[in-house]
Image (cartoon, rainbow, N blue to C red):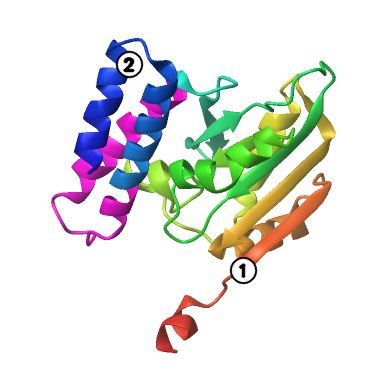
Amino acid sequence: TAERTEALAAEARDRDLPVAAREAFGRASQYYRLAEFFLEPEDDRKPPTYERLHTAFRSYLRHASGRPEAVEIPYGGTALSGFFVPSLRAGSSAPGPAVIVTGGLESLAEEVYFAAALALAEWGFHALVIDGPGQGESLRWRGIPAVAEFERAVTPAVDYLQGRAEVDPQRIALVGYSLGGYYVARAAAYEHRLAALVIWGAQWDYGALWQT
């Protein structure tokens, strides 16, 4: 299904049908995401499936409204990958509110984009989606393992947003779901520049959860 949808997207792109191409590339990226998610870590098909996801999603971005962009957030001596998604609300040139969004244990930024960031942009927020330590590209291609101290990722993310002219530095919020709910609760205890926090269904003990 993913390969067939990606082929349809490429055909639409070549025929100069940007909306059809955008929608098909977006669907293809999520089909690849689900295929990769259910493969065991040692399965040889996992790395190339993630690469197909990565490629399809960036093809989607080239056709997406608002010109979302791939970004890098400094993290120790390396960087975390992510996406800045500008507000889609027209009519104001003043700096606007922004939201940092992260998912959980095995979340990918490409998942979080469709789960939350796109809707936030439609509602008038700028959104920053990051592959935190142990997530997505940051783990798979950069070898950055998960850490409990997620404030180590959030603080440079706030720094990044405060450096963008379109963002109001006093109106930056943080949202996390699943294990990301735990991550953001902890991060907010240390990062005091946040204007708001949303804990969206936090998990904090997966060992206990899997035993039930």
Horizontal placement of 168 versus 121: left or right? right
Separation of residues labelled 1 and 2 (CA atoms): 40 Å
Image quadrant occupied by the N terminus: top left
Q: Is residue 26 above or below residue 136?
A: above
Where is mark 2, residue-wise? 13
Secondary structure of the magenta portion, mostly? Answer: helix
Question: Which image quarter: residue 20?
Answer: top left
Q: Residue at x 73, y 35 (%)?
A: 125
Instruction: State whether residue 142 appears in this view.
Output: no
Q: Position of residue 117 (x, y in %)?
A: 60, 40
Q: Position of residue 156 (x, y in %)?
A: 65, 38
Amino acid bearing label 2:
Arg
Q: Residue at x 40, y 46 (%)?
A: 136
Q: Residues within 10 Å of mark 1 (few under 14, many from 20)?
A: some
**Residue 51 part of the magenta segment:** yes
- Which of 55/27 is in front? 27
Where is mark 1, residue-wise? 202
**Magenta residues?**
33-62
In the rendered structure, are the residues bearing label 1 and label 2 in contact, judged by CB atoms less than 8 Å apart?
no
- Which of 17/115 is in front? 17
Horizontal placement of 112 versus 15: left or right? right
**Residue 206 part of the magenta segment:** no
Q: Position of residue 96 (x, y in %)?
A: 80, 28
